[in-house]
Amino acid sequence: MSRIFLLLAALFLGTAAAAQDLGGRALFERGALEDRRGGTELTLGLSQGVPWRAFTLTDPARLVVDFREVDWQGADPAAMGRSDTVEALRVGRIRSGWSRLVAELSEPMVIGRAGMRVTEATGEARLSLRLEPASPEEMAAASGAPRDPRWDLPEPRATAAPPRDPSAPLRIMLDPGHGGIDPGAQRDGYNEADLMLTFARELRDVLRRAGYVVEMTRDDDVFVSLEARVALAHQAGADLFVSLHADAIEQGIAHGATVYTLSDDASDAASAALAERHDRDDILAGLDLSGADDRVADVLLDLARLDNSPRSTALATHLVDRIRNAVGTVHKRPLRHAGFSVLKAADIPSVLVEVGFLSTAKDLDNLQDEFWRASMAAGIRDGIAAWALEDAALARLRRQ
């Protein structure tokens, strides 16, 4: 893909805007989406002008608009209007200080025009953007995420951690799923990203009191890509990676905790669909993955995985046993596996814990109950402790 339509504040904010504090947070005030004169027009009203950029991506077709920073509180993308060419709108934080709007497109389109006007008297800003129909080839030629250090996260890097001191406390990376522009599963005003961040913070405290060193892939409502989550675990020198989720299913009823390990072949169709949805959420948050044959190629070490796959399976087994003891029940099929990209750290035992299912009323009630969450956290702590004892006993055999 070629570099695309890129707009920065300096290119369009005039003398009136130059007097504004562009480092402040803009509040979202209103939005409108409509099909007009053969194209699609998006208008956003903000409390002040901020630096921004807009570009398109393909596979699937989508528009991305980045801001520094817009507070989307109170924004309802579904209420902005309807368009035959925009299937869905997402808004949210992409990282600290930066936010994003993503429009999922039903057909190839390119940015025809875009601009921001700032009212001198009030400082309020109005962003207007028009999308126009294009052929797939035209959209591909005009699309792609520009690389600009003023806007982008550093490239995720997998750094080799020094050999672990056997006497050092276990270092655990907790990974609260989703976040920012990707809220995850939603029900009755609750979303997976917020619930898992709350639980991860509580679990972190429980594990630290037990003597473990604990870090988190995010400690705020921000988006972290799957690749970056894996890289953060490597950079921290993590001994364990535990990803926390609370998904929803569209058909049937699912209840209780489930623990997943990595496998190319999913244990069942539901697990395969869940792993696919997690990867697709990453794409629809506006990432450009077109140039990567494998998003975690730097950490796919087959030889290391042969050693660590049994360790991940053992961890999952201990977690299920101790969670059952702590909360009284787990899913009827609690041990599963699928191709979750977030579990592809080849040299770190990794599991994904579905703490519950938002689609089940009882599980949603549990996730809101601090006493139930404390029991779940204790179960995970005890499962890790049991695994650590067994793993230490087997360590000499692995070295041989």
Image (spheres, rainbow, N blue to C red):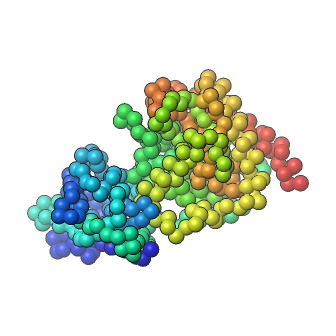
Image point (74%, 36%), residue name:
386
Q: Position of residue 88 (x, y in %)?
A: 33, 51
- In this view, 378 is above or below 122: above
Q: Where is residue 385 in the image (x, y as percent from the top left)?
A: 71, 37
**Left or right: 175 in relation to 379:** left
**Left or right: 316 in relation to 5:** right
Q: Please state which of residues 270 and 43 is positioned toward the viewer in this rendering.
A: 270
Quarter assignment of residue 95:
bottom left
Image point (48%, 34%), residue name:
251
From the image, which quarter does the C terminus lie in?
A: bottom right
Image point (13%, 60%), residue name:
122
Number of marks drawn:
0
- In this view, 179 is above or below 299: above
Q: Please state which of residues 134 and 334 is positioned toward the viewer in this rendering.
A: 134
Q: Where is residue 32 in the image (x, y as percent from the top left)?
A: 21, 54
From the image, which quarter does the N terminus lie in?
A: bottom left
Task: Judge whether residue 47 can be spotted in this image.
Answer: no
Image point (39%, 62%), residue name:
61
Task: Judge whether residue 400 can be spotted in this image.
Answer: yes
Q: Where is residue 325 in the image (x, y as percent from the top left)?
A: 66, 25
Can you name the residue that lies furthest to the left here?
121
